[in-house]
Image (cartoon, grey):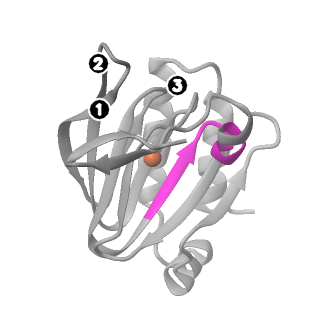
Amino acid sequence: MARNSMETFIEKVRGSWGPLSTGLVAATRRHLVGLLEASADEEWLAALHREAPANQELYRDPQHGFVLLAHTEPAGLYRPPHDHGGGWVIYAMQQGEIEMGTFARLEGPEGGVRLVKRNSTLVRPGQVEVYLPGDIHDTRCLSGPALLFRFTDRDLKKEDREGRRVTRYVEREDVWTVGVP
Ligand SMILES: [Fe+2]
């Protein structure tokens, strides 16, 4: 039976899976670029365009634990700076444009935390962006509705509850800092 692009993607990721390494990131990135080349006629992709879910889990690997999600975002949607706990994430743009910024976290002598923005990248259809453990980023949808895939090496909701918690930052007097607990 002919496989669709999603099944091919899953098979390739499973085939190259292993501990986090340069090679694993490069391979997963390549597989995601392949997934972005799926024909809009494939039913699973046509359904995503038709139904435009804000958040939908497409696949969860029972053996390795990686997860593939789809998100539909309206133009203007902003997601403030955050990290991904101990996990790593690859964003892959299927439709629309999202600006993604990266930040460094600085800690002052008094223990205060502030973020400094490093740069921002406009991510267009066919492109992917990688965020490794500890990386901090924000996203702003500039052209929508945007459809993006979010590949995570683990369940980030579970990571937030039980693992190295995800840190979300808040803006106070024009400075991004940690939220009040
Ligand atoms: Fe993120």
Residue 41 lies in the magenta stretch? no
- Specify the amino acid type for callout 3: Leu
Q: Quadrant of residue 13?
A: top right
Q: Earlier in the sequence, mark 2 or mark 1?
A: 2
- The residue carrying mark 3 is 24
Q: Amino acid at mark 1?
A: Arg
SS of the residue under disc 2? loop
The part of the chain drawn in magenta is 148-159
Q: Position of residue 158 (x, y in %)?
A: 72, 43
Q: Amino acid at mark 2?
A: Gly
Tell me residue 92's x, y (percent).
41, 53
Tell me whether circle 2 and circle 1 mark residues in contact (CB < 8 Å): yes
Q: Residue at x 61, y 36 (%)?
A: 153
Name the residue tied to disc 2: 108
Residue with the mark numbered 1: 114
Of marks 3 and 2, the one in the foreground = 2
Q: Secondary structure at mark 1?
A: strand
Pick whichever of labels 3 and 2 is earlier in the sequence.
Answer: 3
Neighbourhood count class around disc 3 (C-alpha, 10 Å): few under 14, some 14–19, many 20 upward: some
Decide which of 62, 73 is in the foreground and name it: 73
For image coordinates 38% across by 36% down, the residue present is 136
Cβ of mark 2 under 8 Å from ligand 1: the answer is no
Residue at mark 3 to residue at mark 2: CA–CA distance = 35 Å
Viewer-proximal residue among 41 and 181: 181
Indicate the quadrant where residue 70 lies.
bottom right
Q: Position of residue 23 (x, y in %)?
A: 47, 20
Left or right: 83 as drawn, with respect to 13? left
* In-front residue for pair 25/80: 80
Residue occupying the far bottom of the picture: 50
